[in-house]
Image (spheres, rainbow, N blue to C red):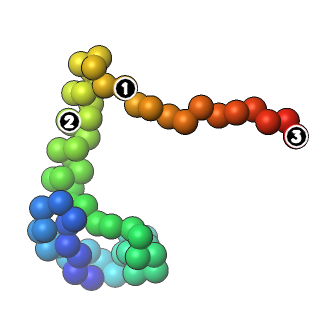
Amino acid sequence: MRVKCVICDKIEVIDDETLQAKRLRNRPIHTYMCQICTNRIAEKTKAHLDSGNFRLYRPKSENDEW
């Protein structure tokens, strides 16, 4: 299966029988990102977290015991 990275537009070939290929075929909301872009984003996110200036805003969960 030929796939295209959503960030760098690099075209790669992945095996048709993999779980990732199945997800891309059956659920159009899933997108493909190459390993280089995935690693780059992970490194930059880790650097932001380590700097102390990065806050991850998560929604506050309300405990509704209804």
Binning the other alpha carbons within 10 Å of mark 2 as few (below 14), some (14 to 19) or many (20 upward) gives few
Q: Residue at x 29, y 17 (%)?
A: 52
Q: Residue at x 27, y 82 (%)?
A: 1
Q: Amino acid at mark 1?
A: Arg
Image height of 65 relative to 34, above or below:
above
**Which is closer to the viewer, label 1 or label 2?**
1
Q: Quadrant of residue 7?
A: bottom left
User: 2 and 50: which one is in front?
Assistant: 50
**Is residue 22 visible to us here?**
no
Q: Which residue is at the far right?
A: 66
Binning the other alpha carbons within 10 Å of mark 1 as few (below 14), some (14 to 19) or many (20 upward) gives few
Q: CA distance from mark 2 to mark 3?
A: 42 Å
Q: Amino acid at mark 2?
A: Lys
Binning the other alpha carbons within 10 Å of mark 3 as few (below 14), some (14 to 19) or many (20 upward) gives few
Q: Position of residue 14 (x, y in %)?
A: 26, 74
- Tell me if 11 is positioned left or right of 31 in this view: left
Along the polypeptide, which appears first: circle 3 or circle 1?
A: 1
- Report which residue position mark 2 lands on: 44
Q: CA distance from mark 3 to mark 1?
A: 32 Å
Q: Residue at x 40, y 31 (%)?
A: 56
Residue 66 is labelled as: 3
- Tell me if 23 is positioned left or right of 16 in this view: right
Image height of 44 relative to 28, above or below:
above
User: 35 and 28: which one is in front?
Assistant: 28
- Report which residue position mark 1 lands on: 55
Q: Quadrant of residue 47?
A: top left
